[in-house]
Amino acid sequence: KDYRTNAAPWWCPGCGDFGVLRALQEAAAKLNLAPENVVLVAGIGCSGKIGDYFRSYSVHTVHGRTMPVAMGIKLANRNLTVIAAGGDGDGYGIGLNHFIHAVRRNIDITYIVMDNHIYGLTKGQFSPTSAQGFKTTSSPAGTADRPVKPLQLALAAGVTYLAQAFSSYPEHMAEIIAEAIQHKGFSLVNCISPCVTYNKVNTYDFYKEHLVNLDEDPGYDPRNYDLAVETVRKHDELVIGRIYINDSQPSYQDLLPGYAEEPLVQAKLDYEPEHWQEILKEFA
Ligand code: SF4
Protein backbone atom coordinates (compact mmCIF):
# COMPACT_ATOMS: atom_id res chain seq x y z
CA LYS A 1 0.00 0.00 0.00
CA ASP A 2 1.07 3.56 -0.59
CA TYR A 3 0.80 5.83 2.46
CA ARG A 4 1.80 9.01 0.63
CA THR A 5 -0.67 11.72 -0.33
CA ASN A 6 -0.58 14.14 -3.26
CA ALA A 7 0.43 17.03 -1.00
CA ALA A 8 4.07 18.13 -1.24
CA PRO A 9 5.66 18.47 2.22
CA TRP A 10 5.92 22.09 3.19
CA TRP A 11 8.79 21.67 5.68
CA CYS A 12 12.19 23.39 5.27
CA PRO A 13 14.77 21.26 3.42
CA GLY A 14 16.56 19.12 6.02
CA CYS A 15 13.82 19.33 8.66
CA GLY A 16 13.77 16.26 10.89
CA ASP A 17 10.04 15.87 10.31
CA PHE A 18 10.78 14.29 6.90
CA GLY A 19 12.43 11.37 8.67
CA VAL A 20 9.45 10.94 11.01
CA LEU A 21 7.01 10.97 8.08
CA ARG A 22 9.05 8.37 6.24
CA ALA A 23 9.27 6.21 9.36
CA LEU A 24 5.53 6.42 9.94
CA GLN A 25 4.83 5.44 6.32
CA GLU A 26 7.24 2.51 6.59
CA ALA A 27 5.70 1.40 9.89
CA ALA A 28 2.23 1.44 8.33
CA ALA A 29 3.57 -0.62 5.40
CA LYS A 30 5.20 -3.15 7.75
CA LEU A 31 1.88 -3.63 9.52
CA ASN A 32 -0.09 -3.54 6.25
CA LEU A 33 -2.53 -1.08 7.83
CA ALA A 34 -5.61 -0.22 5.80
CA PRO A 35 -5.60 3.60 5.49
CA GLU A 36 -9.37 3.69 5.99
CA ASN A 37 -8.92 2.09 9.43
CA VAL A 38 -6.31 4.58 10.64
CA VAL A 39 -6.88 8.03 12.12
CA LEU A 40 -3.95 10.39 12.50
CA VAL A 41 -4.70 13.18 14.97
CA ALA A 42 -2.28 16.04 14.37
CA GLY A 43 -1.43 18.98 16.57
CA ILE A 44 -0.53 22.56 15.72
CA GLY A 45 2.96 23.51 14.56
CA CYS A 46 5.27 22.52 11.72
CA SER A 47 4.96 18.88 12.74
CA GLY A 48 1.16 19.06 12.69
CA LYS A 49 1.34 19.16 8.89
CA ILE A 50 2.15 15.46 8.94
CA GLY A 51 -1.57 14.73 8.78
CA ASP A 52 -1.61 16.16 5.24
CA TYR A 53 1.19 13.88 4.05
CA PHE A 54 0.21 10.51 5.52
CA ARG A 55 -2.62 8.66 3.79
CA SER A 56 -5.30 7.88 6.36
CA TYR A 57 -8.15 9.74 7.98
CA SER A 58 -6.74 12.79 9.69
CA VAL A 59 -7.97 15.33 12.20
CA HIS A 60 -6.05 18.57 12.63
CA THR A 61 -6.88 19.63 16.16
CA VAL A 62 -6.49 22.90 18.00
CA HIS A 63 -3.25 23.53 19.88
CA GLY A 64 -2.38 20.96 22.53
CA ARG A 65 -5.52 18.87 22.11
CA THR A 66 -4.34 15.80 20.23
CA MET A 67 -4.74 13.60 23.31
CA PRO A 68 -8.43 14.21 24.13
CA VAL A 69 -9.39 14.00 20.45
CA ALA A 70 -7.41 10.78 19.94
CA MET A 71 -8.83 9.26 23.13
CA GLY A 72 -12.37 10.15 22.09
CA ILE A 73 -11.93 8.54 18.68
CA LYS A 74 -10.51 5.34 20.19
CA LEU A 75 -13.30 5.13 22.74
CA ALA A 76 -15.93 5.61 20.05
CA ASN A 77 -14.45 2.96 17.77
CA ARG A 78 -11.88 0.61 19.18
CA ASN A 79 -11.43 -1.02 15.76
CA LEU A 80 -9.51 2.00 14.48
CA THR A 81 -5.76 2.42 14.78
CA VAL A 82 -5.40 5.82 16.40
CA ILE A 83 -2.12 7.70 16.16
CA ALA A 84 -1.50 11.20 17.48
CA ALA A 85 1.39 13.30 16.22
CA GLY A 86 2.61 16.76 17.12
CA GLY A 87 5.51 18.77 18.42
CA ASP A 88 7.09 19.26 21.83
CA GLY A 89 5.36 22.61 22.29
CA ASP A 90 1.98 21.14 21.42
CA GLY A 91 2.36 18.04 23.57
CA TYR A 92 4.58 19.05 26.48
CA GLY A 93 3.55 22.70 26.76
CA ILE A 94 -0.02 23.52 25.75
CA GLY A 95 -1.16 19.90 25.99
CA LEU A 96 0.91 18.73 28.96
CA ASN A 97 -2.00 18.06 31.26
CA HIS A 98 -3.78 15.97 28.63
CA PHE A 99 -0.57 14.06 28.02
CA ILE A 100 -0.20 13.00 31.66
CA HIS A 101 -3.80 11.79 31.86
CA ALA A 102 -3.59 9.89 28.57
CA VAL A 103 -0.45 8.12 29.82
CA ARG A 104 -1.89 7.15 33.20
CA ARG A 105 -5.10 5.87 31.58
CA ASN A 106 -3.07 3.57 29.36
CA ILE A 107 -5.51 4.02 26.53
CA ASP A 108 -4.56 2.12 23.38
CA ILE A 109 -3.23 4.91 21.20
CA THR A 110 0.24 5.79 19.89
CA TYR A 111 1.65 9.25 20.42
CA ILE A 112 4.49 10.40 18.16
CA VAL A 113 6.09 13.59 19.42
CA MET A 114 8.40 15.36 16.99
CA ASP A 115 10.70 16.98 19.50
CA ASN A 116 12.98 19.75 18.22
CA HIS A 117 13.28 21.80 21.43
CA ILE A 118 11.87 24.94 19.78
CA TYR A 119 8.73 26.51 18.32
CA GLY A 120 9.55 26.47 14.60
CA LEU A 121 6.25 27.55 13.03
CA THR A 122 6.22 30.82 14.97
CA LYS A 123 9.87 31.51 14.08
CA GLY A 124 12.01 30.23 16.89
CA GLN A 125 10.85 30.74 20.47
CA PHE A 126 12.07 28.44 23.28
CA SER A 127 9.84 25.46 23.91
CA PRO A 128 9.13 23.29 26.98
CA THR A 129 12.03 20.97 26.13
CA SER A 130 14.59 23.74 25.45
CA ALA A 131 17.62 23.61 27.73
CA GLN A 132 17.97 26.28 30.41
CA GLY A 133 20.02 29.16 29.04
CA PHE A 134 18.96 28.48 25.42
CA LYS A 135 19.06 31.73 23.42
CA THR A 136 16.16 32.29 21.05
CA THR A 137 14.15 35.17 19.64
CA SER A 138 12.04 35.13 22.82
CA SER A 139 14.95 34.53 25.20
CA PRO A 140 17.87 36.61 23.87
CA ALA A 141 19.65 36.40 27.23
CA GLY A 142 18.92 32.67 27.55
CA THR A 143 15.76 31.05 28.90
CA ALA A 144 15.42 30.89 32.68
CA ASP A 145 13.07 27.88 32.53
CA ARG A 146 14.28 24.40 33.29
CA PRO A 147 13.18 21.92 30.60
CA VAL A 148 10.43 19.34 30.73
CA LYS A 149 12.01 15.88 30.57
CA PRO A 150 9.42 13.92 28.58
CA LEU A 151 10.89 10.46 29.11
CA GLN A 152 11.10 10.83 32.88
CA LEU A 153 7.67 12.42 32.95
CA ALA A 154 6.13 9.53 30.99
CA LEU A 155 7.80 6.97 33.26
CA ALA A 156 6.53 8.79 36.34
CA ALA A 157 3.00 8.87 34.89
CA GLY A 158 2.99 5.09 34.33
CA VAL A 159 3.70 4.73 30.62
CA THR A 160 3.57 1.14 29.35
CA TYR A 161 5.52 1.61 26.08
CA LEU A 162 8.23 4.22 25.87
CA ALA A 163 10.82 4.66 23.14
CA GLN A 164 12.88 7.41 21.62
CA ALA A 165 14.09 7.56 18.03
CA PHE A 166 16.10 9.93 15.85
CA SER A 167 15.15 11.29 12.42
CA SER A 168 18.54 10.41 10.98
CA TYR A 169 17.74 6.73 11.49
CA PRO A 170 14.27 6.35 9.93
CA GLU A 171 14.48 2.54 9.59
CA HIS A 172 15.07 2.23 13.34
CA MET A 173 12.29 4.72 13.98
CA ALA A 174 9.93 2.76 11.69
CA GLU A 175 10.59 -0.49 13.60
CA ILE A 176 9.82 1.27 16.86
CA ILE A 177 6.67 2.99 15.58
CA ALA A 178 5.36 -0.33 14.21
CA GLU A 179 5.98 -1.96 17.60
CA ALA A 180 4.38 0.95 19.44
CA ILE A 181 1.23 0.72 17.28
CA GLN A 182 0.96 -2.99 18.12
CA HIS A 183 1.37 -2.38 21.84
CA LYS A 184 -1.92 -2.81 23.73
CA GLY A 185 -1.97 0.39 25.74
CA PHE A 186 -0.54 3.88 25.54
CA SER A 187 2.72 4.13 23.62
CA LEU A 188 4.93 7.18 23.40
CA VAL A 189 7.58 7.49 20.71
CA ASN A 190 9.52 10.68 21.32
CA CYS A 191 11.17 11.44 17.99
CA ILE A 192 14.22 13.68 18.02
CA SER A 193 13.51 15.74 14.94
CA PRO A 194 15.95 18.65 14.49
CA CYS A 195 14.75 22.07 13.37
CA VAL A 196 17.51 23.11 10.98
CA THR A 197 16.21 26.65 10.59
CA TYR A 198 15.88 27.92 14.16
CA ASN A 199 17.74 25.54 16.47
CA LYS A 200 21.49 25.74 15.95
CA VAL A 201 22.28 23.88 19.20
CA ASN A 202 20.31 20.63 19.01
CA THR A 203 21.59 19.72 15.56
CA TYR A 204 22.01 16.40 13.73
CA ASP A 205 25.72 16.47 14.56
CA PHE A 206 25.03 17.11 18.25
CA TYR A 207 22.75 14.08 18.46
CA LYS A 208 25.04 11.82 16.42
CA GLU A 209 27.77 12.59 18.91
CA HIS A 210 25.72 12.21 22.09
CA LEU A 211 22.94 9.66 21.60
CA VAL A 212 23.29 6.23 23.16
CA ASN A 213 21.38 3.42 21.43
CA LEU A 214 19.88 1.19 24.12
CA ASP A 215 18.84 -1.38 21.51
CA GLU A 216 22.54 -2.05 20.90
CA ASP A 217 23.29 -2.59 24.59
CA PRO A 218 22.93 -6.32 25.41
CA GLY A 219 22.92 -5.47 29.12
CA TYR A 220 19.90 -3.18 28.87
CA ASP A 221 16.49 -4.66 29.72
CA PRO A 222 13.51 -2.50 28.67
CA ARG A 223 11.23 -4.54 30.98
CA ASN A 224 13.08 -3.24 34.04
CA TYR A 225 11.36 -0.05 35.22
CA ASP A 226 14.01 1.00 37.73
CA LEU A 227 16.72 0.52 35.13
CA ALA A 228 14.75 2.64 32.64
CA VAL A 229 14.40 5.49 35.14
CA GLU A 230 18.07 5.30 36.11
CA THR A 231 19.24 5.12 32.47
CA VAL A 232 17.28 8.10 31.12
CA ARG A 233 18.46 10.17 34.08
CA LYS A 234 22.06 9.07 33.73
CA HIS A 235 22.15 10.04 30.05
CA ASP A 236 20.01 13.15 30.51
CA GLU A 237 17.47 11.59 28.09
CA LEU A 238 20.03 11.34 25.27
CA VAL A 239 19.10 7.76 24.49
CA ILE A 240 17.32 6.07 21.60
CA GLY A 241 15.66 2.68 21.31
CA ARG A 242 13.16 0.83 23.47
CA ILE A 243 13.32 2.38 26.92
CA TYR A 244 10.46 0.72 28.79
CA ILE A 245 7.86 -1.90 27.84
CA ASN A 246 5.19 -3.27 30.15
CA ASP A 247 2.74 -5.69 28.54
CA SER A 248 1.09 -6.80 31.77
CA GLN A 249 -0.86 -3.62 32.49
CA PRO A 250 -4.46 -3.78 31.18
CA SER A 251 -5.38 -1.01 28.77
CA TYR A 252 -8.07 1.54 29.62
CA GLN A 253 -10.49 -0.19 27.28
CA ASP A 254 -9.98 -3.52 29.07
CA LEU A 255 -11.06 -1.88 32.31
CA LEU A 256 -14.15 -0.12 31.01
CA PRO A 257 -17.31 -2.16 31.71
CA GLY A 258 -19.01 -3.19 28.46
CA TYR A 259 -16.43 -1.52 26.24
CA ALA A 260 -15.12 -4.72 24.73
CA GLU A 261 -18.52 -5.89 23.52
CA GLU A 262 -18.87 -3.66 20.48
CA PRO A 263 -17.57 -0.30 19.29
CA LEU A 264 -19.68 2.56 20.59
CA VAL A 265 -20.29 3.83 17.05
CA GLN A 266 -22.01 0.53 16.23
CA ALA A 267 -23.93 0.17 19.48
CA LYS A 268 -27.70 0.16 19.30
CA LEU A 269 -29.12 2.89 21.47
CA ASP A 270 -32.05 2.02 23.71
CA TYR A 271 -33.70 5.38 23.23
CA GLU A 272 -36.86 5.66 21.16
CA PRO A 273 -37.19 8.74 18.90
CA GLU A 274 -39.52 10.37 21.45
CA HIS A 275 -36.71 10.30 24.03
CA TRP A 276 -34.42 12.16 21.65
CA GLN A 277 -37.16 14.76 21.13
CA GLU A 278 -37.31 15.23 24.91
CA ILE A 279 -33.56 15.68 25.13
CA LEU A 280 -33.46 18.07 22.17
CA LYS A 281 -36.13 20.27 23.75
CA GLU A 282 -33.53 21.28 26.35
CA PHE A 283 -31.43 22.82 23.60
CA ALA A 284 -34.28 24.44 21.67
FE1 SF4 B 1 11.18 22.05 10.35
FE2 SF4 B 1 12.11 24.10 11.77
FE3 SF4 B 1 11.49 24.43 9.23
FE4 SF4 B 1 9.57 24.06 11.03
S1 SF4 B 1 10.97 25.82 10.92
S2 SF4 B 1 9.71 23.08 8.98
S3 SF4 B 1 10.56 22.60 12.43
S4 SF4 B 1 13.12 23.11 10.01
Image (tube, rainbow, N blue to C red):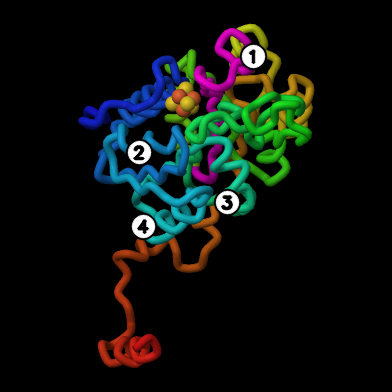
Q: In which quarter of the view is residue 238 placed?
A: top right
At 21% from the left and 30% from the top, the residue drawn is: 6
Which residue matches tag 4?
Answer: 77
Place residue 150 in its image quadrant. Answer: top right
Alpha-carbon span between mark 4 and mark 2: 20 Å
Residue 202 sits inside the magenta stretch:
yes
Amino acid type, residue under disc 3 in the picture: Ala
Of the residues shown, which amino acid type is indicated by label 2?
Gly
Q: Earlier in the sequence, mark 1 or mark 3?
A: 3
- Residue 46 vs 276, above or below: the answer is above
Observer-nearest residue: 167 or 206? 206
- The alpha-carbon separation of the residues under discs 3 and 2 comes to 20 Å
Q: CA distance from mark 1 to mark 3?
A: 27 Å
- Residue 65 in the image, given as x and y percentages of width and height: 50, 52
Q: Assess disc 4: are there few (<14), some (14-19) or many (≥20) residues with their C-alpha within 10 Å of its C-alpha.
A: some
SS for dot 4 = loop
Q: Which mark is residue 2?
A: none
First in sequence: mark 1 vs mark 2: 2
Checking the image for residue 211, the label placed there is 1
- Range of residues picked out in magenta: 184-206
Q: Identify the residue under disc 2.
A: 51
Pair 4/2: label in front: 2
- Spatial CA span between label 4 and label 3: 17 Å
Query: In the rendered image, which residue does mark 3 sit on?
Result: 102
**What is the crowding at mark 2: few (fewer than 14 residues within 10 Å), some, or many (at least 20)?**
many
